[in-house]
Amino acid sequence: MDAAALMLLLSLSGAEAVERPRPAPAPHCLDARRIERSRQIAPDSLLVLAGGEGFRVQLSDACADANGTAPERLLARNGWVCGAEREFAQAGARLCPVRAVEPLDARRYAELARSADRDAAAVPPDATLLDGVDVTAKAPPHRRFRGTHEYCFNPRWVTSWSIVRQEIVVRTRARRSGGHSQYRLELGGACVDLDEAPHVSFVSGVGIGMVCGNAGDKAVALGEVPVPGMTSADARLTRSVRTGSLLASEAGCPILAVYPD
């Protein structure tokens, strides 16, 4: 390989931004000089955020050097990675050909990033897997979960919220939210009483202070929520019962996914 014909773009863990966007040679191409973050989500697959857009980069085979080092750089002519010839991910001294580049929408990118981070937190890279054993103690939830602004928001920085097609859109302080001013929250069902709630509380189910779509994450309606066909006094007495199920104002409405909007 003629190394001089390739441009060393940047480390996948850091980015040197391009001042002005360049026209892509094809709609699916990744501008590697605008990479903001990446992670290896499978031996032959990278998840890359570049210029605010998400991509999955498929490699021709599992990519790591003899020491187990994951890919650190992308190499390509003119900085564009499109899945064409002479495009590589570099892991130590090894060059792994890029096979394909797939653009991802915000929801799919957040889903893959969250899954990869959960897997990394659950099993350390140098761990040795043994036969299963029974245990009686459990690690605190906040030690087994983590989150980033790519797929989580901190309720502390929410400035407003609205219901859009049975989803919640929250506006946040961008400076405190990784540059994101708005997130979309997918709910586990039609939580109709949220439409009437004067206030909503967003709760982290695993105690990390961020809402990411983890188990137990929920939106809780606060304040008096009117129930059709009942007086205000009756509603206060029976808020926990409505068509045989709990109101979101009592049980909370599950949040299944979070991603920048």
Image (tube, rainbow, N blue to C red):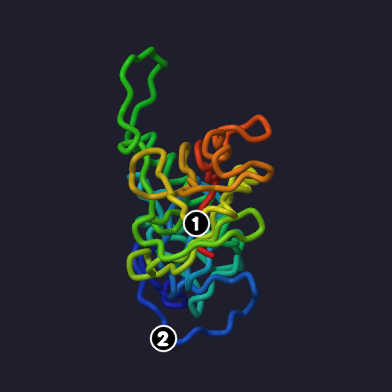
Quarter of image, res 3: bottom left
Residue 208 appears in the picture as rendered: yes
Q: Is residue 253 left or right of residue 155?
A: right
In this view, the residue in front, 134 or 215, is: 215
Residue 56 appears in the picture as rendered: no
Give above or below for 254 relative to 25. Answer: above
In this view, the residue in front, 70 or 120, is: 120
Give above or below for 44 relative to 24. Answer: above
Give the farthest residue toward the bottom.
20
Quarter of image, res 10: bottom left
Q: Which mark is residue 93?
A: none
Q: Is residue 31 left or right of residue 24?
A: left
Q: Give the SS element for disc 1.
A: loop
Q: Residue at x 34, y 70 (%)?
A: 175
Q: Give the SS element for disc 2.
A: loop
Q: Residue beneath label 2, please?
A: 19
Hey, what amino acid is under mark 1? Pro
Q: Residues within 10 Å of mark 2 (few under 14, many from 20)?
A: few
Hey, what amino acid is under mark 2? Glu
Whole-percent x and y of residue 80?
Answer: 53, 75
Q: Residue at x 34, y 40 (%)?
A: 207
Give above or below for 72 relative to 192. Answer: below
Q: Residue beneath label 1, please?
A: 198
Q: Residue at x 33, y 48 (%)?
A: 209
Whole-percent x and y of residue 67?
Answer: 33, 45
Q: Nearer the viewer, mark 2 or mark 1?
A: 1
Whole-percent x and y of residue 143?
Answer: 30, 37
Quarter of image, res 104: bottom right
Between the C-alphas of marks 2 and 1, the distance is 43 Å
Q: Residue at x 46, y 60 (%)?
A: 89
Q: Is residue 58 left or right of residue 223?
A: right
- N-term mark: 2 or 1: 2
